Amino acid sequence: MEEALLWYWLGNIKGIGIRKERKLLEQWKTPEQIFCAPEEKLKQTQGIGEKDLQAILSSRKEEGWRRQFEWLRRKKIRYISYFDKAYPERLRQIPAPPKHLYVKGEMPELSGVTISIVGARDCTCYGRDMARMFAHRLSGAGVQIISGMAKGIDGWAHQGALEGGGKTFAILGCGVEVCYPPAHRKLYESILRQGGVLSEFSPYTQAKPGFFPMRNRIISGLSDGILIVEARERSGSLITADAALEQGKDVFVIPGRIGDELSVGCNRLICQGAVPVLSPGDILSYYGMKEKRDNIEETLSEEEKNILSVIGMKPIHALQIAAAVKVEETTVFKRLFALKGKKLIQEVSRSYFTRIMP
């Protein structure tokens, strides 16, 4: 019988967790030997009680797990047991590692630097821009970006990584076949094309509040370091930071203005020893990496440079731009179209533009 199928069988026996799986494997070496072991010998396994024995025996006779595994294969969802060679070594080292992972798309490569970016769901425009800019530039330098695909900072971090051309991975508080929040459907599909989604929950498990703190330990566990962008004094981001500290990971924080509600958690972390960062270069330097900056702006005409100089992070209308640079409106629209094509600006609403952070 196929080894991957048997790992799935063993990992989904009710009541058999990592500790008991280890006991079984210490004696029987492989899931195939456990599956084929005679009842009399199986009951002699140290640490396996009568209830566990009956669960193992009854599961052998069931067909449901075989159909489920074939369904996973058709959906191109990988099942990775804690005891599988493909299981990320970083996760083995954390307290309470997940028993298994369901993976759609790719897995993070363990050889490269990986940074998690998390923060407030109801972030400010500043927080949004910082998450996007840091992810964009880190991704462009070859750093893998991990987040939780939630609204706010998480979503913008994924978006920035996608725009930077690098890999990004979403750790979900639901199953990998569930897009949560539903509004992130396009983002979810983009992540699958340029990275992957992972979860410890079965594929169609719906999101529940208690699942998000659980997924936070995986977010930090898969990373070299974690970057916090805007966090209240009590927030899920701080739970992730606590998990990172417990796991011995690096914790970076973008400082915030004193008195701002969404800065309290970040500034408190800095007081407790987290590393304040003012640019993506600070994180890259920490890991001995250099930033790969595109010189595209050097190729712009003087007219394009002038137009670009008046566009910032606050939306500005094309007519305001034309007035500021004293260029005909039709010409400005042509130059704006060219700048959009070079991914230097974006149209956030009809005829309103903002810079795309480099």
Image: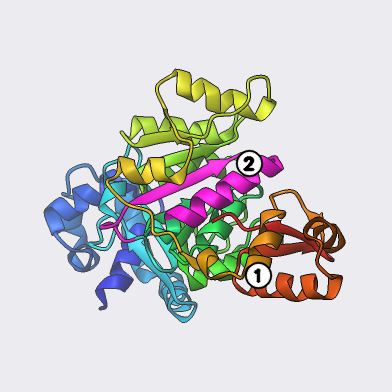
Disc 2 versus disc 1: nearer the observer = 1
- Tag count in the figure? 2
Residue indicated by mark 2:
127
Q: What residue type is labelled 2?
A: Gly
Asked if residue 128 shows in the view, the reply is yes
Q: Which of marks 2 and 1 is nearer the N terminus?
A: 2
Residue shown at 70% from the left, 44% from the top: 125
Magenta region: which residues? 109-138
For the residue pair 79 and 332, the one nearer the viewer reads as 332
Report whether 233 appears left or right of 310: left
How far is the residue under mark 2 from the one under mark 1? 24 Å
Report whether 346 appears left or right of 189: right
Report whether 42 appears left or right of 304: left
Check if residue 60 falls in the magenta segment: no
Residue shown at 80% from the left, 67% from the top: 327
Q: Which residue lies furthest to the bottom in this view?
A: 74
Q: Is mark 1 on a helix, strand or loop?
A: helix
**Residue 349, picture quadrant:** bottom right
Residue shown at 67% from the left, 70% from the top: 340
